[in-house]
Image (cartoon, helix red, strand yellow):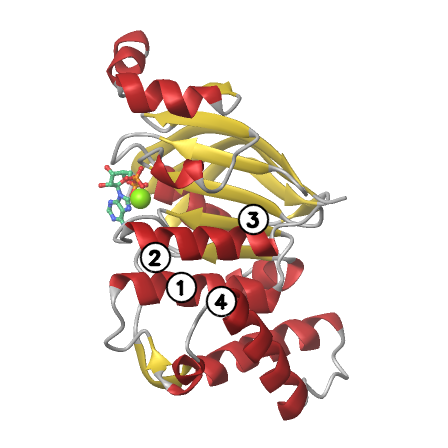
Amino acid sequence: MSELVIKNLHVNVEDTEILKGVDLTIKSGEVHAVMGPNGTGKSTLAYALMGHPKYNVTKGKATLNGQDLLNLDPNERSSLGLFLAFQYPVAVPGVSVANFLRTALNAHRKYEDPEDKGISIPDFRKKLKEKMALLKMDQSFAGRYLNDGFSGGEKKRVEILQMATLEPKFSILDETDSGLDIDALKIVSDGINAISSENHGVLVITHYQRILNYIKPDFVHVMLHGRIVQSSGPELALKLEDEGYEWLREKHAA
Ligand code: ADP
Ligand code: MG
Protein backbone atom coordinates (compact mmCIF):
# COMPACT_ATOMS: atom_id res chain seq x y z
CA MET A 1 0.00 0.00 0.00
CA SER A 2 1.32 3.45 -0.93
CA GLU A 3 0.42 6.82 0.45
CA LEU A 4 0.69 10.32 -0.95
CA VAL A 5 0.50 12.86 1.86
CA ILE A 6 0.14 16.60 1.36
CA LYS A 7 0.29 18.74 4.48
CA ASN A 8 -0.35 22.45 4.84
CA LEU A 9 0.97 23.13 1.34
CA HIS A 10 1.50 26.79 0.49
CA VAL A 11 2.51 27.69 -3.04
CA ASN A 12 3.46 31.00 -4.62
CA VAL A 13 3.40 31.87 -8.29
CA GLU A 14 5.44 35.00 -8.99
CA ASP A 15 5.18 36.25 -5.40
CA THR A 16 1.43 35.73 -5.20
CA GLU A 17 0.26 33.10 -2.78
CA ILE A 18 -2.06 30.74 -4.71
CA LEU A 19 -2.27 27.72 -2.42
CA LYS A 20 -2.90 28.67 1.17
CA GLY A 21 -2.53 25.47 3.10
CA VAL A 22 -3.73 22.33 1.34
CA ASP A 23 -4.06 19.02 3.20
CA LEU A 24 -4.80 15.85 1.30
CA THR A 25 -3.94 12.19 1.79
CA ILE A 26 -4.42 9.66 -0.98
CA LYS A 27 -3.88 5.95 -0.50
CA SER A 28 -3.37 3.48 -3.30
CA GLY A 29 -6.64 2.08 -4.57
CA GLU A 30 -8.47 5.33 -3.85
CA VAL A 31 -9.89 7.79 -6.33
CA HIS A 32 -10.10 11.39 -5.13
CA ALA A 33 -11.64 14.24 -7.05
CA VAL A 34 -10.68 17.87 -6.55
CA MET A 35 -13.35 20.14 -7.98
CA GLY A 36 -13.61 23.90 -8.01
CA PRO A 37 -14.19 26.97 -10.14
CA ASN A 38 -11.49 28.19 -12.53
CA GLY A 39 -8.59 30.05 -11.00
CA THR A 40 -8.84 28.50 -7.54
CA GLY A 41 -5.48 26.72 -7.65
CA LYS A 42 -6.27 23.20 -8.88
CA SER A 43 -3.56 23.16 -11.55
CA THR A 44 -1.22 24.91 -9.13
CA LEU A 45 -1.58 21.94 -6.80
CA ALA A 46 -0.78 19.53 -9.64
CA TYR A 47 2.24 21.50 -10.86
CA ALA A 48 3.64 22.07 -7.40
CA LEU A 49 3.43 18.35 -6.62
CA MET A 50 5.22 17.51 -9.85
CA GLY A 51 7.92 20.16 -9.28
CA HIS A 52 7.27 22.79 -11.94
CA PRO A 53 9.90 25.49 -11.29
CA LYS A 54 7.39 28.35 -11.52
CA TYR A 55 5.41 26.98 -8.60
CA ASN A 56 7.24 27.85 -5.47
CA VAL A 57 6.44 25.89 -2.32
CA THR A 58 6.85 28.25 0.61
CA LYS A 59 5.49 26.06 3.40
CA GLY A 60 4.22 22.57 4.11
CA LYS A 61 5.20 19.19 2.81
CA ALA A 62 4.42 16.44 0.36
CA THR A 63 5.62 12.88 0.76
CA LEU A 64 5.25 9.62 -1.12
CA ASN A 65 5.52 6.65 1.21
CA GLY A 66 7.23 8.91 3.71
CA GLN A 67 9.80 10.20 1.25
CA ASP A 68 9.95 13.97 0.82
CA LEU A 69 9.01 14.89 -2.75
CA LEU A 70 9.56 18.61 -2.61
CA ASN A 71 13.37 18.56 -2.73
CA LEU A 72 13.39 16.22 -5.74
CA ASP A 73 13.56 17.04 -9.44
CA PRO A 74 10.44 16.30 -11.50
CA ASN A 75 12.12 13.28 -13.13
CA GLU A 76 12.91 11.84 -9.71
CA ARG A 77 9.31 12.36 -8.58
CA SER A 78 8.21 10.62 -11.73
CA SER A 79 10.58 7.72 -11.15
CA LEU A 80 9.22 7.33 -7.63
CA GLY A 81 5.78 6.80 -9.12
CA LEU A 82 4.10 10.18 -9.40
CA PHE A 83 2.42 10.99 -12.69
CA LEU A 84 0.71 14.10 -14.00
CA ALA A 85 -1.56 14.14 -17.03
CA PHE A 86 -1.40 17.75 -18.21
CA GLN A 87 -4.40 19.99 -18.73
CA TYR A 88 -2.60 21.37 -21.79
CA PRO A 89 -0.22 18.73 -23.20
CA VAL A 90 2.60 20.20 -25.29
CA ALA A 91 3.60 19.07 -28.75
CA VAL A 92 7.12 17.78 -29.37
CA PRO A 93 7.63 17.67 -33.14
CA GLY A 94 10.43 15.30 -34.09
CA VAL A 95 9.86 12.90 -31.21
CA SER A 96 7.50 10.02 -31.87
CA VAL A 97 5.01 8.85 -29.27
CA ALA A 98 6.77 5.46 -29.12
CA ASN A 99 10.21 6.98 -28.71
CA PHE A 100 9.03 9.35 -26.05
CA LEU A 101 7.38 6.58 -24.05
CA ARG A 102 10.33 4.22 -24.36
CA THR A 103 12.74 6.94 -23.22
CA ALA A 104 10.56 7.75 -20.21
CA LEU A 105 10.18 4.08 -19.32
CA ASN A 106 13.92 3.47 -19.59
CA ALA A 107 14.68 6.54 -17.47
CA HIS A 108 12.48 5.02 -14.74
CA ARG A 109 14.21 1.67 -15.02
CA LYS A 110 17.61 3.30 -14.79
CA TYR A 111 16.56 5.26 -11.72
CA GLU A 112 15.64 2.00 -10.03
CA ASP A 113 18.71 0.14 -11.27
CA PRO A 114 21.65 2.16 -12.66
CA GLU A 115 22.88 -1.01 -14.42
CA ASP A 116 19.63 -1.44 -16.35
CA LYS A 117 20.14 -1.58 -20.11
CA GLY A 118 16.59 -0.58 -20.99
CA ILE A 119 13.58 -2.53 -22.18
CA SER A 120 14.17 -4.54 -25.36
CA ILE A 121 12.49 -3.24 -28.49
CA PRO A 122 10.26 -6.33 -28.91
CA ASP A 123 9.19 -6.19 -25.27
CA PHE A 124 8.46 -2.50 -25.57
CA ARG A 125 6.48 -2.97 -28.77
CA LYS A 126 4.41 -5.67 -27.11
CA LYS A 127 3.73 -3.52 -24.07
CA LEU A 128 2.81 -0.48 -26.15
CA LYS A 129 0.50 -2.52 -28.35
CA GLU A 130 -1.26 -3.87 -25.29
CA LYS A 131 -1.70 -0.45 -23.72
CA MET A 132 -2.90 1.11 -26.96
CA ALA A 133 -5.48 -1.63 -27.34
CA LEU A 134 -6.64 -0.92 -23.80
CA LEU A 135 -7.23 2.71 -24.78
CA LYS A 136 -8.70 1.80 -28.18
CA MET A 137 -5.97 3.75 -29.94
CA ASP A 138 -4.96 3.10 -33.50
CA GLN A 139 -1.46 1.57 -33.68
CA SER A 140 -0.41 4.30 -36.12
CA PHE A 141 -0.35 6.72 -33.17
CA ALA A 142 2.93 5.25 -31.99
CA GLY A 143 4.81 6.57 -35.01
CA ARG A 144 3.36 10.08 -34.97
CA TYR A 145 5.20 13.01 -33.44
CA LEU A 146 4.11 13.62 -29.86
CA ASN A 147 0.93 15.72 -29.82
CA ASP A 148 1.95 17.35 -33.11
CA GLY A 149 -1.31 18.22 -34.84
CA PHE A 150 -3.26 15.98 -32.44
CA SER A 151 -6.86 16.88 -31.63
CA GLY A 152 -7.74 17.75 -28.04
CA GLY A 153 -9.11 14.25 -27.50
CA GLU A 154 -6.04 12.58 -29.02
CA LYS A 155 -3.73 14.57 -26.75
CA LYS A 156 -5.65 13.47 -23.67
CA ARG A 157 -5.55 9.89 -24.86
CA VAL A 158 -1.77 10.07 -25.22
CA GLU A 159 -1.54 11.37 -21.65
CA ILE A 160 -3.44 8.31 -20.46
CA LEU A 161 -1.33 6.05 -22.68
CA GLN A 162 1.69 7.52 -20.94
CA MET A 163 0.13 6.75 -17.59
CA ALA A 164 -0.67 3.19 -18.67
CA THR A 165 2.89 2.63 -19.90
CA LEU A 166 4.69 4.09 -16.89
CA GLU A 167 2.42 2.36 -14.35
CA PRO A 168 2.74 5.03 -11.65
CA LYS A 169 1.71 4.67 -8.02
CA PHE A 170 -0.20 7.95 -8.08
CA SER A 171 -1.68 9.81 -11.02
CA ILE A 172 -2.97 13.34 -11.11
CA LEU A 173 -5.33 13.96 -14.01
CA ASP A 174 -5.68 17.69 -14.57
CA GLU A 175 -8.96 18.38 -16.39
CA THR A 176 -8.52 15.31 -18.56
CA ASP A 177 -12.20 15.75 -19.46
CA SER A 178 -11.83 19.21 -20.95
CA GLY A 179 -12.11 19.29 -24.71
CA LEU A 180 -13.43 15.74 -24.93
CA ASP A 181 -16.69 14.88 -26.59
CA ILE A 182 -18.81 12.25 -24.90
CA ASP A 183 -17.39 9.30 -26.90
CA ALA A 184 -13.79 10.31 -26.25
CA LEU A 185 -14.60 10.93 -22.59
CA LYS A 186 -15.99 7.42 -22.30
CA ILE A 187 -12.97 5.84 -23.96
CA VAL A 188 -10.53 7.82 -21.84
CA SER A 189 -12.46 7.05 -18.66
CA ASP A 190 -12.67 3.36 -19.54
CA GLY A 191 -8.91 3.44 -20.06
CA ILE A 192 -8.32 5.06 -16.68
CA ASN A 193 -10.63 2.56 -15.01
CA ALA A 194 -8.88 -0.32 -16.75
CA ILE A 195 -5.55 0.84 -15.33
CA SER A 196 -6.80 1.57 -11.84
CA SER A 197 -6.04 -1.08 -9.31
CA GLU A 198 -5.35 -1.39 -5.63
CA ASN A 199 -1.79 -0.33 -6.44
CA HIS A 200 -2.78 2.95 -8.03
CA GLY A 201 -4.13 6.09 -6.41
CA VAL A 202 -5.83 8.69 -8.60
CA LEU A 203 -6.47 12.39 -8.17
CA VAL A 204 -8.98 13.63 -10.72
CA ILE A 205 -8.99 17.41 -11.04
CA THR A 206 -12.11 18.68 -12.71
CA HIS A 207 -14.36 21.67 -13.04
CA TYR A 208 -17.36 19.59 -14.09
CA GLN A 209 -18.96 16.58 -12.50
CA ARG A 210 -19.37 14.85 -15.89
CA ILE A 211 -16.18 12.75 -15.83
CA LEU A 212 -17.12 11.50 -12.35
CA ASN A 213 -20.05 9.63 -13.90
CA TYR A 214 -17.42 7.40 -15.49
CA ILE A 215 -14.58 7.49 -12.98
CA LYS A 216 -16.24 6.93 -9.62
CA PRO A 217 -14.50 8.89 -6.88
CA ASP A 218 -14.30 7.61 -3.30
CA PHE A 219 -13.79 11.17 -2.03
CA VAL A 220 -14.69 14.57 -3.44
CA HIS A 221 -12.94 17.75 -2.32
CA VAL A 222 -13.78 21.30 -3.26
CA MET A 223 -11.04 23.86 -3.71
CA LEU A 224 -11.81 27.55 -3.30
CA HIS A 225 -9.30 30.39 -3.10
CA GLY A 226 -6.37 27.99 -2.73
CA ARG A 227 -7.84 25.88 0.04
CA ILE A 228 -9.83 22.69 0.26
CA VAL A 229 -13.01 23.95 1.88
CA GLN A 230 -15.12 20.83 1.79
CA SER A 231 -14.44 17.08 1.61
CA SER A 232 -17.06 14.41 1.34
CA GLY A 233 -18.16 11.30 -0.53
CA PRO A 234 -19.24 11.17 -4.20
CA GLU A 235 -22.60 12.75 -3.37
CA LEU A 236 -20.85 16.12 -3.06
CA ALA A 237 -20.11 16.09 -6.81
CA LEU A 238 -23.81 15.67 -7.55
CA LYS A 239 -24.72 18.52 -5.22
CA LEU A 240 -22.20 20.76 -7.03
CA GLU A 241 -23.67 19.70 -10.36
CA ASP A 242 -27.12 20.75 -9.15
CA GLU A 243 -26.26 23.83 -7.16
CA GLY A 244 -22.96 25.10 -8.58
CA TYR A 245 -20.23 26.57 -6.42
CA GLU A 246 -22.08 29.68 -5.29
CA TRP A 247 -23.26 28.33 -1.92
CA LEU A 248 -19.67 27.48 -1.08
CA ARG A 249 -18.38 30.85 -2.22
CA GLU A 250 -20.83 32.55 0.11
CA LYS A 251 -19.78 30.33 2.97
CA HIS A 252 -16.08 30.88 2.33
CA ALA A 253 -15.75 34.46 1.14
CA ALA A 254 -12.12 35.28 0.27
P1 ADP B 1 -7.32 26.31 -11.74
O1 ADP B 1 -6.51 25.16 -12.26
O2 ADP B 1 -8.11 25.97 -10.51
O3 ADP B 1 -8.18 26.95 -12.78
P2 ADP B 1 -4.75 27.62 -11.47
O4 ADP B 1 -4.01 26.82 -10.45
O5 ADP B 1 -4.39 27.41 -12.89
O6 ADP B 1 -6.31 27.45 -11.24
O7 ADP B 1 -4.55 29.15 -11.16
C1 ADP B 1 -4.73 29.72 -9.88
C2 ADP B 1 -4.30 31.17 -9.90
O8 ADP B 1 -2.89 31.22 -10.10
C3 ADP B 1 -4.91 31.99 -11.01
O9 ADP B 1 -5.20 33.27 -10.47
C4 ADP B 1 -3.82 32.07 -12.05
O10 ADP B 1 -3.91 33.27 -12.77
C5 ADP B 1 -2.57 32.00 -11.23
N1 ADP B 1 -1.50 31.29 -11.97
C6 ADP B 1 -1.41 29.97 -12.15
N2 ADP B 1 -0.34 29.63 -12.88
C7 ADP B 1 0.28 30.78 -13.17
C8 ADP B 1 1.46 31.12 -13.91
N3 ADP B 1 2.21 30.17 -14.49
N4 ADP B 1 1.79 32.40 -14.00
C9 ADP B 1 1.04 33.37 -13.41
N5 ADP B 1 -0.08 33.12 -12.71
C10 ADP B 1 -0.46 31.86 -12.58
MG1 MG C 1 -6.43 24.26 -14.14
**What residue is pinned by disc 4?**
161
The correct choice, above or below, for 213 with respect to 117 in the image is: above
Q: CA distance from mark 4 to mark 2?
A: 14 Å
Alpha-carbon neighbours of circle 2 within 10 Å: few (<14), some, or many (≥20)?
Answer: some
Please identify, in this view, whether the residue under mark 3 or under mark 2 is nearer the observer: 2
**What residue is pinned by disc 1?**
157
Q: Is residue 228 visible?
A: no
**Residue 230, located in which quarter of the rendered image?**
top left
Foreground residue among 70 and 253: 253
Q: CA distance from mark 1 to mark 3?
A: 28 Å
Quarter of the figure that contains the N terminus:
top right
Position of residue 165 in the picture relative to residue 9 (left or right): right
Q: CA distance from mark 3 to mark 4?
A: 26 Å
Q: Quadrant of ligand 1?
A: top left
The correct choice, above or below, for 228 with respect to 71 in the image is: above
Q: Amino acid at mark 1?
A: Arg
Circle nearer the N terminus (1, 2): 1
Please identify, in this view, whether the residue under mark 4 or under mark 2 is nearer the observer: 2
Q: Which mark is residue 184?
A: 2
The correct choice, above or below, for 158 with respect to 114 in the image is: above
